Image (tube, rainbow, N blue to C red):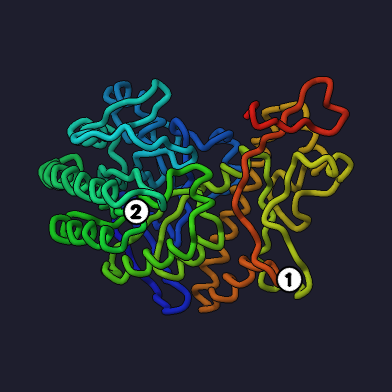
Amino acid sequence: MKFVIEKISKSSGRLGYLVQTETEKRFRTPLLVQTTKGGSIPYLSREVFDYVTEEVPALQFTLSTIDHMVESLKLFNGTFGAYVGYPECLSLLIIRDSCELIPSGHNDKDIIPLFTRRGKEHITVKRYMDTVETLKPDIYQGLCDADTNLESSKKRIIKCVDRTAQFMDACYERHQNSKVLKKCALFAPIVGGYSTHARCESIKHAKAKGEKLANGYIFEGFHNYGLSACQVDSEQLIKVMTHCLNELSDDKPKMMPGAYTPPVMLELISLGVDIFDTSYAYCAASNFKALTFNFNLKTVENATSQPFLEISNESLKEDFTPLIRDCSCLTCRKHTRAYLNHLYKTKELLGPILLMIHNLHHMMHFFSTICKCIADDNLPDLIKLIKFQRGSLAVDYSIKPNTKIISKNDQDKNYTILNDDQK
């Protein structure tokens, strides 16, 4: 995998592309990779995903959701992308499922916990690198301890940096000596919570041991994934990331997995982060929220938008308009808000499918607009639009869990809200 930079702007981030080694296919950065569960894009088959986009996707595979497939893959003569029906994709392997909240704790000296469909597993460096050799992804992250957040103690942060350095020493050695991994790109993890000193120590180790082996960097340990990524302290996050990115060279891509909100993504892109995933779109769809935020700089000045539409709202039951009037996705062309509200009431699986189609389409067009704004050097204008949506107050993009329940007797009434003791 090669990384090529086309343009760098002090105020608008940078444009570039990742190039697959064998196929020479290019993937534009800032890049939005499709997060997967069990090797599949959540709610969508390959055939349905083709309705979302005709472009070759970049897929983010998660070890915690595909660990049970490793044994069968040893008998498969090909890449994991081909195994799950996406032979032409750019494959990226990370350890933790960015869509789900991951429990803290369960850490030990020589292992990290992996929460899979079979329960908690213990992952050693040897087992992890054996798995990487079996999967043969285009890009994979190094093993790390990322169990930190804003509330982590100083002792926990120090331990995560030390253990990650220990893991990465073994990963670098295995990567260098492996014939299979010569075609795979290694992303070195940068950890350390919200401590700039700890992050710098992690960067120093990555530079000292992996300067020639690491093809990029992945930043973890700011949250516990799932909806917690929507609620990060953006000021603290940007402060730490600004310091970290100043310590790293510009010639390697940087990735931040997790369901970061669009305003936070834009701020990070302006600093030089290149790769994000679609877990925000998934978290919205799984909580019955349709993304509706406006990213069109040419809209009327007094037009205002909300970040998402609550499909569970009773007011939508007779609203026969699309989710967004000018949206060209399959959901908006064929279905209405009232129909999606009906699907929610009847608990039909088609509801999350249609929402996922729309949310992915919306996020992908959002990233296309980001690339255009960087090319035109007006990303600050887009940041302002996303943050305020033509209003005077900053808009809240954080996703709250959907706690509404519906029984058969309630389908023609207002929904019942869970009490605290029912949650």
Where disc 1 sits, the SS reads loop
> Crowding near pointer 2: few (<14 within 10 Å), some, many (20+)?
many
Amino acid on which the number 2 mark rests in the picture: Gly
Number of marks in the rendered image: 2
Along the line of sight, the residue nearer the viewer: 138 or 38: 38
Are circles 2 and 1 on residues that touch, CB within 8 Å? no
The answer to whether 215 is drawn above or below residue 287 in the figure is below
- Which residue is nearer to you in this view: 354 or 242? 242
Q: Nearer the viewer, residue 321 or 303?
A: 303
- Percent x, y of residue 298: 70, 73
Q: Is residue 323 left or right of residue 183?
A: right
Which mark identifies residue 389?
A: none
Residue 353 in view, yes or no? yes
Give the residue at mark 2. 193
Image quarter where the C terminus lies is top right
Badge 2 marks a residue whose secondary structure is loop
Q: Earlier in the sequence, mark 2 or mark 1?
A: 2
Q: Tell me if mark 1 has few (under 14), some (14-19) or many (20+) residues whose alpha carbon lies within 10 angstroms of its own.
A: few
Question: Would residue 244 be found to the left or right of residue 328 on screen?
Answer: left
| Left or right: 225 in relation to 368 | left
Residue ID at (37%, 44%): 91
Residue 402 location, x and y as percent? 66, 38
Q: Amino acid at mark 1?
A: Thr
